Amino acid sequence: MKFLAPLLLLAAVACGSLGPVTGAPLSEPQLEFKVMDAVGKPLWCDPDFYPLARAGGEQASAIARYPEIKADATTYAAIVAHEHLPSSGDLTDAQKLVLYRAWKLLRPLQLKKDGDRYSFEYTIVTTSGNYQLVAGSVRTDGVVTVDSRAPGGRPNCPICLASWTLIATPSGPVRVTDVRVGTVVWTQGADGSRVAAPVVGVGSMEAPPGHMVVHVVLADGRSLFVSPGHRTADGRAIGMLRPGDSLDGSTVRSTELVRYGGGRTYDLLPAGPTGRYWADGILVASTLA
């Protein structure tokens, strides 16, 4: 009997029911690329194109974000190796764009660690043009296993606020779901002052299962849950903010993509020249302007 356990183990390995991890563990960015290479690129709402794309905007973002990406040595090394970019020296603007596009794809692919592997679930477009929700896992040595494939849907790219967001009004905070045309809110005047003005437009979009929102937290304690493409008062996509960036008189302490379970997202347009208003105490721009 003392030989039985080793024989059973050998048989299990030979049959493939046990998949021993071999080789050195890979970094999380390396594992994410392994998953994308095996399964496909994730569909997501790219903040360079939602709510509005602008000519040259993605290249400008690539150049602006280059120092930040390069400062993350682990991620930078994984990207340049995967994209066959030079590993030393500065990149050209064209190479920075390649780097930036790969870096953006790492954000919506969320890996969840479970022992010696990470689980994943995300939507892809198949070669036949269908949307597919793929779930599986990747071992720390980069071996990818697909557990399920199910029909998926094209991501609806909401550009609005979480349903529990509070909007600043002269009468006190009002939940965004309760704001109607005619509701008087605080908006920013052309001179930067706070002005009371009626809402002239409201909007709402269904958020599909798996929709991600950004939880941005400021150094002064204010925080907001909002879709990545929503714009700050000065026109930046909130999904592109990073710790240390300035925002509404404070600095960003943290940003995190989290799953949204609120069903729908919301926005409003106050009367006046700016279309800006305060959501959970943070000045943002309306997407309805």
Image: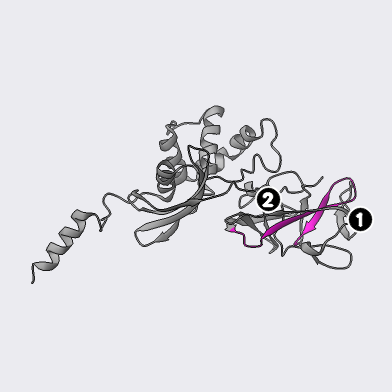
Q: Which residue is painted at 62% across and 62% down in the image?
A: 261
Residue with the mark numbered 2: 158
Q: Which residue is painted at 42% across and 46% down in the image?
A: 35
Mark 2 crowdedness (10 Å alpha carbons): few <14, some 14-19, many ≥20:
many
Q: Which residues are magenta?
A: 259-280
On whether residue 243 falls in the magenta region, the answer is: no
- Res 195 visible: no
Q: Position of residue 67 (x, y in %)?
A: 55, 40
The quarter of the rendered structure image containing the C terminus is: top right
Q: How many marks?
A: 2
Q: Position of residue 227 (x, y in %)?
A: 66, 52
Q: Are marks 1 and 2 in contact (CB under 8 Å)?
A: no
Q: Amino acid at mark 1?
A: Ala
Query: What secondary structure is found at the residue carrying circle 2?
Result: loop
Query: What secondary structure is found at the residue carrying circle 1?
Result: strand
Label placed on residue 271: none
- Tag 2 or tag 1, which sits nearer the N-term? 2
Give the side of residue 131 with respect to residue 83, left or right: right
Mark 1 crowdedness (10 Å alpha carbons): few <14, some 14-19, many ≥20:
many
Instruction: Give the camera-side residue of 20 and 16.
Output: 16
The residues tagged by marks 1 and 2 sit, at their Cα atoms, a distance apart of 25 Å
Q: Which residue is painted at 75% across and 62% down in the image?
A: 280
- Res 170 visible: yes
Instruction: Give the camera-side residue of 9 and 54.
Output: 9
Q: Position of residue 44 (x, y in %)?
A: 58, 46
Q: Quadrant of residue 59?
A: top right
Q: Amino acid at mark 2?
A: Pro
Residue with the mark numbered 1: 197
Q: Is residue 75 above or below residue 197?
A: above
On whether residue 273 falls in the magenta region, the answer is: yes
Q: Position of residue 18 (x, y in %)?
A: 25, 58
